[in-house]
Amino acid sequence: MFTGHWTYANKIYKEKNSINRLMGYKSYRRTIKVPVHYGITKIKTAKLNKLTARLTYCTQLFSDIISQTRYITRTKLAFYEKEIAKKTKLNAAYIQQCKDKAIWMWKSYKKEYVHWEFKLKKAKKGTKWHSKLLKRKPSEPFSNSINKIPICLDS
């Protein structure tokens, strides 16, 4: 059995009326139980696992290209799209999603690294804070472990 729920929250704007000030927020909750056959869910999860593995591989390929060439723009990475599409056998929408994910990962890494360098310059050498900062150095994407990447599936 699959049990799902959805929550609908409706904010009532506070006006000069005292009733609205007392009510504040309203929220409603419903739980829907839908019977699902185990075989169907097993097949769907297997397909989803294969798709997420291919998307992770695609993102890793883009990440490798970014680490070698240091290109972080969509236009410069567009040159590699056809080659990666042949390797992963994904359609153009998923390739673009993987490219955007890799670009986002590298941009956030650079932002964290600049912030880390700034903190490291402020810390005095030999202090406990300096040694903690050295341990907290941000790592490049896909450098430590390869976990599956969350994906967006349009319905």
Image (spheres, rainbow, N blue to C red):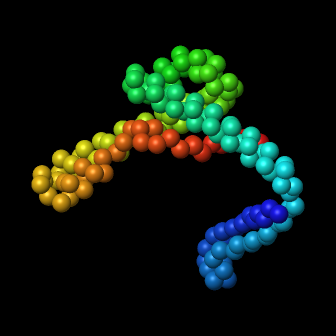
* Residue located 51% across and 28% down the image: 62
Q: Is residue 132 left or right of residue 61?
A: left
Q: Tell me which corner region of the image, top left, top right, bottom left or bottom right, holds residue 72.
A: top left
* Residue located 78% across and 45% down the image: 44
| Relative image position of residue 77 (x, y in whole percent) | 50, 22
Q: Tell me which corner region of the image, top left, top right, bottom left or bottom right, holds residue 132.
A: bottom left
Foreground pick, 43 / 60: 43
Residue 155 visible, this orientation: yes
| Relative image position of residue 79 (x, y in whole percent) | 53, 16
Foreground pick, 25 / 16: 25
Looking at the rendered structure, the number of numbered marks drawn on it comes to 0
Residue 108 visible, this orientation: no
Q: Is residue 84 left or right of residue 133?
A: right
Q: Is residue 72 left or right of residue 27?
A: left
Where the N terminus falls, by quadrant? bottom right
- Residue 152, compared with residue 132, is above or below; it is above
Q: Is residue 69 left or right of residue 80?
A: left
| Relative image position of residue 155 (x, y in whole percent) | 77, 42
| Relative image position of residue 138 (x, y in whole percent) | 34, 45
* Residue located 25% across and 44% down the image: 117
